[in-house]
Amino acid sequence: MPQLEELFEAVVNGDREAASRITQEALAGGIDAMDLLEKAMIPAMDEVGRRFECEDYFVPELLLAARAMKASMEFIRPVLAERGAKPAGRVAIGTIKGDLHDIGKNLVASMLEGGGFEVIDLGADVAPERFVDAVLNRGAQVVCLSALLTVTMNSMRTTIEALERAGVRDRVKVLIGGAPVTAQFAREIRADAYSENANSAVAAARQLVAAQVA
Amino acid sequence: MTARERVLTTLSHREPDRIPIDFGTTSVTGMHVSTVAALRDYYGLERRPVKVQECLQMLGLIEADLQQALGIDVEGMLGRKTNFGFPIRDWKPWRLNSGLDVLVPGDFNTTVDANGDTLIYPQGDTSVAPSGRMPAGGHFFDVIVRQEPFDDENLNPSDNLEEYGPVDPVALEYFAHATRTARATGRAVVASFGGTGFGDIAHVPGPALKHPKGIRDIAEWYMSTTSRRGYIHQIFSAQCDYAIANLERIYAVVGDNIDIAFICGTDFGTQSSTFCSVNTFRDLYFPYYKRVNDWIHAHTPWKTFKHSCGSVVRFIDSFIEAGFDILNPVQCSAAGMDPEVLKSKYGDRVVFWGGGVDTQHVLPFGSPQEVREQVLRRCDIFARGGGFVFNTIHNIQAGTPVENIVAMFDAVNEFNGERSGNAATRRAV
């Protein structure tokens, strides 16, 4: 199906207009929305991630690809939702309390969405209770916490403590990341996983969901 | 050696009598105002509210008595206006979220929103949309993006150049006066005249403008460096023309009263990688940096200062080729930024201004002993053969334990003491 290849190319090349147009044409032409997701979108975002890992792509290219992916998902998502299709997992993501930086968080959210996850984006400067709410009331299986600032990164710890206090810690996995964050810090605050960048966050989220299901 | 001689010696890659120290001279080598207040208390200096000299990151002015206590060798000239476009003068009281009383410029006008966030306004004008936000309980502002709709087919570079243009006579007069005063301190002088930062993401949203036009959204800007590169070139080219014309006028009034010009704070590194490839850097940024540095080196005795956070090891050759003399903040905690490698590979060609201690982990969260050990190690590596000005890796943040900061200064003094023959304490490390 050339349209799957064309959509793949449009997303990898960050061509928003082409991604939007091809998706609409493909859906109108009877191509299955799940095929668009699984055979074009997810492989495209995997390819973008691969290029990022090998430093062929950088932040601008990631942002462009994410924007193209979103333009396409605008049409794919409603079709899948109507059909009751199950996402790869449901993830709540936000930059922690006291920190307004959201570029890294947005990139991770986009990579997750492009990876087939349902993403609940809570924004920046997110209070611990809002993460708790996302688990309690919106069924988040994974909570992703992002931080850029050293001075407020302890909000990651207080967010995990809030999940514990609310009695939901055992039904959610916590994935953390951001410039000052390290694997050691993740262990210290009892997070389930740490990711160094947007691409590896997708693999980490897949593992966490798999571990939870198992 | 005088403080200035010490700095000039290290800038020319010769070992001075001791490692020169900078704190508080630029927007990237300072301390949060609460930290300055804590140090004043620690050293028993007169209790008075500290002035916020940089109102985005809320950096405190390090006055002469504290400079003396800390052994600072460099004097700064930060410019006439804040990032939010109002002049740094007419001090008035203000209270931080922590309850600490400080002084801020007269046009530092704020409101508090329903969320408890503090909002600050461009040029102090509360009748327009705010351009900075400090979260409730936060310590400094982040720029608010105010992106108006734009027509991709009819982008006009002049929309992104509103904040650039010929330097005004009031600013020139200020530069002349402020640099004369700075020179009289006997310290080396670093000046931030503005206008030479190409694509600095802290400036892109136009925090000083009441109604910014053009591409002001941060993600949109980053994407534009790839998808609208011609447009970005047009902006940088015109900005560079202004910058060089302004430097001519500034040099005419400032002359040799400064030693170092802060050129650009655009970050090219991230914690584990870079924001762009070396090829992109060389195509999009290098030509403009080179024009600015070449002009300065051809017409003035000034050294030029480049700041970039993160992992920039792959850019250093290009920075040097573009004519930068000084690299800051030397983020050794980022990928590939090993101090030994940096010093051995680039130490004779670029001055490391920073790198003294890690402000992400060791300084805020380590013990005083861990701080001391890292500072001594870094001094040992970076000071060899000169080419090193001691500074932390970027500004010292709010909440950093004062005993760790004191341990840092004590360690530099200990190292400097050893250099004049007192090796006993060093061996205890």
Image (cartoon, helix red, strand yellow):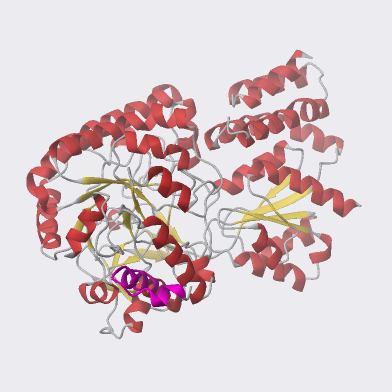
> Which residue is found at the position 80% from the left and 66% from the top?
A168
Which residue corresponds to the image point at 65% horizontal and 26% vertical from the top-left?
Answer: A11
- As drawn, is A70 to the left or to the right of A80? left
* Residue A116 visible from this viewpoint: yes
Q: Nearer the viewer, residue A85 or A201?
A: A201
Query: Left of B412 or right of it: where is B372?
Result: right
Q: Is residue B98 above or below residue B314?
A: below
Q: Position of residue A72 (x, y in %)?
A: 68, 29
- Tell me residue B326's x, y (percent): 31, 47
Q: Residue at x 76, y 48 (%)?
A: A205
Q: Residue furthest right?
A: A214
Towards the viewer: B91 or B112: B91
The answer to whether residue A98 is left or right of residue B55 is right
Magenta highlight on residue B412: yes
Question: In which quadrant will I find the N terminus of chain A?
Answer: top right
Q: Is residue A140 visible?
A: no
Q: Between residues B318 and A64, which one lies in front from this camera angle?
A: B318
Q: Is residue B281 magenta?
A: no
Instruction: Examine the rendered structure and indicate whether residue B214 appears above or below residue A30.
Output: below
Question: Where are the magenta residues, as a range?
Answer: B411-427
